[in-house]
Amino acid sequence: MIRFITLSLALIGLGGCALPWAEENSPIAPTDTWRDALQASLEAHGAVTHAENLLIPRVFRFTPPEGAETVSLTGSFTGWTSEGIPMSDPDGDGIWTVTYALRPGEHLYKFVVNGDQWHHDPLNPDRVDDNHQGFNSVIQISQGGQIPLAPGSLDGHVQDGFIIHRPADQASLQRTDELGLQVTLLTLEGDVESVEVLFGAGELPTGVSMDHIYTRDMFDHWRADLTLSPDDLTGPMGMAFIIRDGVDQVILGADGATRSTLTWPQPFVVMPAQFDFHPVPAWAMDAVWYQIFPERFRNGDPSNDEQPVVPWTWSWFEPFTDGEARNFYHFVFERKFGGDLQGVEWALDYLENLGVTAIYLNPVFEAQSLHKYETSDYRHIDDNFGVAGDLEGLDEGLDPSTWVFTPSDRIFLDLVEDAHRRDMHLIIDGVFNHSGRLHWAFQSIVASGEASPCADWYKITSFDPLEYEGWAGEPDLPEWNQDANGLVEPVARHIFDITRRWMDPNGDGDPRDGIDGWRLDVPNEIARPFWDRWCALVRSLNAQSYTVGELWDRAPAWTAPDLFDAHMNYAWLRLVHGFFINGDMTASELSRALFELHETYDYRTNFVMQNLLDSHDTDRIASAIINPGRDVDQGNRVQDGAVYDQSKPGPEAFRRMRLIQTFQFTCIGAPMIWYGDEVGMWGADDPECRKPMLWPDLMPCDSPDDVINTDMLRHVRALAHIRQTFPALRRGHLRPTLADDSNGVFAFERRLGMRSSTDDIITVLHRGEGNVIVTIPVHWPDGTAVIDALGRWSNPDREITLHTVVVDGEVTLPLGPDAGAILVAIE
């Protein structure tokens, strides 16, 4: 709610309610204006010109095994680099220590010994699974200040000693866009009824009610998203808070907390124009992503197939070769179905109709395998994805002037052009930590050994016999050499040249003929100085380019204005598993965890995160639902001995999946569809998650289970179009409106700006069996008609019916098992 303050000689009124400093008949001097108080505070306390993360030092100790030469601290706060923060043992007692400052909140960490031995903290019992058969230790950093001994109560008295707001701390004050400012205040848990923020630079401030977001460490978190005026932005702006509990009202300003009602408080003075905010590509905030694994998406040109090709509709578990009959999981990884870029081009109409606006292609550069993660030539698109044999006879060197565009390259560039013509964006996989053994630089070493001009390009440990380091110990993935600056200079220069080639193919300075960005494979394996240079190059080529890192844990150190825009949001996916699949998280815990996750990153970063439900590296979400009790990407590889149900999920699983997708498409972040999820594909982790796409014109498949789920397709299409129709779902703030733990109901509002309006959207999610009647508080006026947009869009033949109207500030609606609704107000 937004209200404007009016002034009289006897009373200052706020929306008909007396302000705390203006008791009836109290004399107020006409010259005592908000602007006067602002100037007095500026002279007394100065102005806050920027907000940084509040950092609180903590001491870490670790006793490593014998033989430790180096020990470092690493974690979510370093991007999980093996270099981390160096530790030392100056007194030689065997205990290595380091003092490091962290921002308030939850952090994951480990110790790294000798650069490659990773250990959790044995002295810290608080730990979580690290998804690699080990643990990450967890440390909680409190806000500091006084530590409450117990929660408060609504007793008509505000505990003013436990009110926290630090304008110089990003957790308290953060600029969100050109005219946006997010403000957060903490009060003792359960102690106050309401909080209001006053702000402005004029004679009178503007008052905005703050929303209670969540509770952590016995503090309630209150938040408001302010829309500033040009005057607020250009000069000093004042800000103060009114905290109420019954008749008791406390005013918090730069001079502390007071109950005085005879004058304006001295407000906090901030200079919003000097606050930085993270610029992200605008199109990425609006994106509906679709991830394509080219070899398994569509065979558009059989003439480029690498034989033998498995028939597209082959029953997956039916052995295709004698090798598969003997040892299925040894030979199935060699299967090729003939998917190519012509198939992706053919499918653009389908993707456009689905509501997709951005495409992420798994690797497309020349490589031998079906997945293409062992690149043999970054300069060219794989000929089995375009025109077979078009690399033969090429004579190219390191100099980009010697490079040509092959027919396969041209097919790819035509695909980019056609996607752009449809207002779609397209990014590709950048696998820059390692190459394949067939890469021409590695083959030069194989042929010439230490005399090769590329001898220092790889991590060679012996030239005779040839021995080297492979990523994750894989000999087929030799790692590029690194020094303190990341990739060694000749490799870095080559990657920079490759980046220019595909982002501006004709080199004219206009990036519209090139790709729109990159997904970076295992980027934390390369030292950050390389990425600083690379990201600067990318943005110089295309200021609206998008970069997203494959980072499996929270890693805010890797998202910054000069680094990546986003991550593949596996941390968000863990919340999905916790609440919707495993059931070990309540609705209120989901609400709190969601906000804590968002607070880990810059405000705008959250809007461009790729919110995925699965990928080429995990089991499909439909199968995850019938295999609960696991963390993301855990216990899902049958070939490794996992006990995993690989049968086709039933109707109840797909019903739960639709509920999860409703959350995915209405939450902050950009939803990403793993190809085939929209038609109900299922499977364990690789290779089952990479089955061939199901297409109507290729039915029937050999297995009767492989059919298109039209309910899923209709649901995803509806969600995509709802997201594109309502700006609040792409750009709006998120506010919790209901967390009913007993019934498994979570509801939240997406709101544009600081003013509640009929443009707001409310999502209601019921995880559980049976039917429930849900009553949700709303900001819409009484009598406002409300419909469920999801029910309308997913059932286009049904007439619009009003589900309910607002009564006493609430909306009531029925929900069935695992059901959701997207509520829209009709003016």
Image: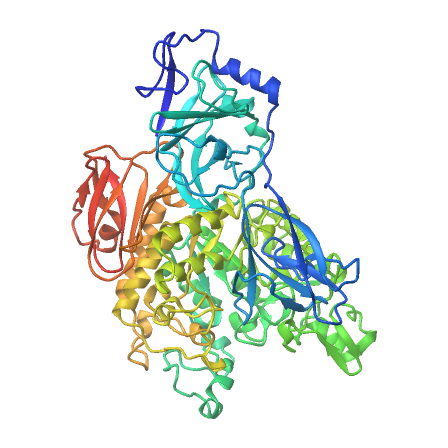
With 238 as the anchor, is 50 left or right in this view?
right
Q: Nearer the viewer, residue 711 or 635?
A: 635
Quarter holding the N terminus? top left
Question: How far across and how far down the image is residue 768, in percent?
Answer: 27, 60
| Colour treatment of the image | rainbow
Q: Residue furthest front?
A: 149
Q: Residue at x 52, y 70 (%)?
A: 385
Question: How far across and how far down the image is residue 207, in percent?
Answer: 40, 25
525 in relation to 474, above or below: above
Q: Residue at x 60, y 33 (%)?
A: 50
Question: How far across and how far down the image is residue 310, in percent?
Answer: 43, 82
Instruction: Kindly tell me whether residue 315 is visible in this rendering.
Output: yes
With 634 as the anchor, is 537 left or right in this view?
right
Q: Residue at x 36, y 82 (%)?
A: 315
Q: Nearer the viewer, residue 476 or 160?
A: 160
Q: Nearer the viewer, residue 589 or 681?
A: 589
With 161 as the anchor, is 154 left or right in this view?
left
With 603 as the anchor, is 314 left or right in this view?
left
Question: How far across and how far down the image is residue 668, in percent?
Answer: 42, 48
Quarter holding the C terminus? top left
Instruction: Kindly tell me whether residue 727 is visible in this rendering.
Output: no
- Give the number of callouts: 0
